[in-house]
Image: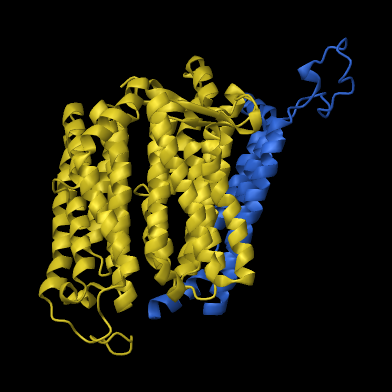
Chain colours: A yellow, B blue
Amino acid sequence: MMEHYPAFIVIVPFLFAFVVSGVAWIKKELCFPLTLVGLGLSAWFSVCLLRQVATTGVLKYRMGGWETPWGIGYHVDYLNGLVVTVVTVLAFINLIATRKNVTEETPEKEGAFYSLYLLFIVGLTGILLTGDLFNLYVLLEVASLTSYALIGMGSGRAPMSSLNYLFVGTVGGCFYLLGVGYLYIMTGSLNMADVATLLPKLYNSNAIVMAFIFCMVGASIKMAFFPLHMWLPNAYGFAPTAAGSLIAPLMTKVMVYVLIRLILTVFSVDFAFVVMKMGDPMVWMSSLAIVAGAVFALSQKNLKRMFCYIIVSEIGYMMGGAWLGNNAGMTGAILHILNDAIMTLCLFLCAGSIYYRTHGLELDRLKGLFLKMPVTMACFVASALSIIGVPPTCGFFSKWYLISGGLQAGQYGFVAALLFSSLVNVVLFFRVIEISYYGDFETHHGHGSSPAVVMESPASMLVPLLIVSIGLVVVGLYTCSIVNHLIAPILMQHGF
Amino acid sequence: MSDLIVAVLGKYNYWLCIVLMMIGLYAMIAKKNLIKKLVGMNIFQTSIILFYVSIGCKKGATIPILEHRADHSVLVDAAHYINPLPHVLMLTAIVVSVSTFGVALALAIKIYRKHKTLEEDEILMQLRSE
């Protein structure tokens, strides 16, 4: 039983997705509890898997008993054990928190929504656990297709932005597939560990260089790395609340994981940094991404779109950290995958809670919200402090690692970009806090939100939100043991 | 010049894929109609599928079915059979491309119901005037 956990994490939500879409025809009320059970099991299995990996080390699972270079192997080490736990647990919390948003925004479509929700998790967990390059492509497209559909379920401009995301995302997926094709031609293998052992002899081949570039560009498009970010703000901004707060924290972070996995396991650190010399240009690109994301965020008048540009900026943090090429930078990047997922989820849940009561997220609509929704706004302040990087919230620690990595590598431009974006974040969030604290509450006619209606959100939204906000501090306080027990062994293994 | 011709003709399958890919990319970027963009996207994906299919081919080889499976005295030479793995991979990629096309068409229907047009510039004009 225990040895099949890697497969269960992916297959259980997959089976539940079919059950949910079938049950939706008979009894709609059952959809949510079934999804809860499916995701809960998946989250439980991933926590158990992480504990097992922490005691026994790397875990190799052969799908259907086929030996690995021929069959598909699931390869679980600290890196994906950690990220898969974060993904499933956060998706579970988001599911509970956004239930009321789902019934309000996509009425009569809960069955479809929840089965897509589960399939999205199938895609993400599959990407994280698989040790096979082509399998990764297929699951990447599963995750992307479900996210197109989830975003397209929104109203207004959502279908158009989802279609734009689909065009760009498909090109990204195709580039990755082309890169895998080059690797296959040169090595004759698709298993990541196998390819890694065959590659060192071929480092000087142009085809491998092209494979590397195609894979990197494909992953960068899917993670919205500046200047390939154009699809992100519209797609995440116009998505239904529940879908936005599911996809925004998880999808981009999983793609950063894919990039780190490709650098560490498949192409190896030597190839990426010594043969290709990609370190410096990529760190400069990341600095540009950080600054551009921060500047675009300043010009936004809508809370959710502001968050979207903050994500663009945070992607720059993680890419820059990964490409610094030293221990502190890579530690910061991996730690930031975890921290940023929690912070972004907290921000989007706050936005969901506010939207549930005000039905609008324009900044001038937030006036007086501290009085009306004290708990939500307190959580908002917590996540804002974490994004800015105030100790003891988790955002501080990953930023600390990134800055010290930047100083060690002599990348002062990157350090300056990090500090600049922290200052811009101070301005961004204190502007919101000022509006919602000092502004008088105004009545908006025609949108159905009079002052009497606007009050604190129901407990079913607040409790998960509080848990996530407490998580921000708890993860911050346990940073030391996370880094020592989970992240340091991975980096040691790959020669950092 | 003759080197170039040899390079093109010797690897004509790759060149065909590149040409198809560029046609698809051009349609996705330059066309205003959403359905034309979608067809461009499909051409783009198909070019990669053809790329994979072509790399499995060998001159003078046959389909990879062994006639003398039980007979171990007959040596199997891999050069006599084409490589079936890229073709099998592409079955999955075709499924992915078909489902992407399906999702995209569903979104296009949703857009058409709202805007009553599939021309991108007209949709953008409507969105701006909102």
| Outermost front residue | A1
| Outermost left residue | A438
The residue under the point 28% across, 90% down is A445
Q: Quadrant of residue A339?
A: top left
The residue under the point 28% across, 42% down is A336
| Outermost top residue | B73
Q: Position of residue A173 (x, y in %)?
A: 53, 45
Q: Quadrant of residue A54?
A: top left
User: A57 or A447, which lies in front?
Assistant: A57
Judge whether residue A98 can be spotted in this image. yes
Quadrant location, the C terminus of chain A: top left
Quadrant location, the N terminus of chain A: top right
User: A226 or A301, which lies in front?
Assistant: A301
Q: Position of residue A408 (x, y in %)?
A: 18, 27
The residue under the point 64% across, 63% down is A22
Judge whether residue B40 can be spotted in this image. no
Q: Is residue A211 above or below residue A354?
A: above
Q: Is residue A334 left or right of residue A366?
A: right
Q: Is residue A122 above or below residue A128?
A: below
Q: Position of residue A309 (x, y in %)?
A: 30, 57
Q: Position of residue A57 (x, y in %)?
A: 41, 25
The residue under the point 52% across, 34% down is A2
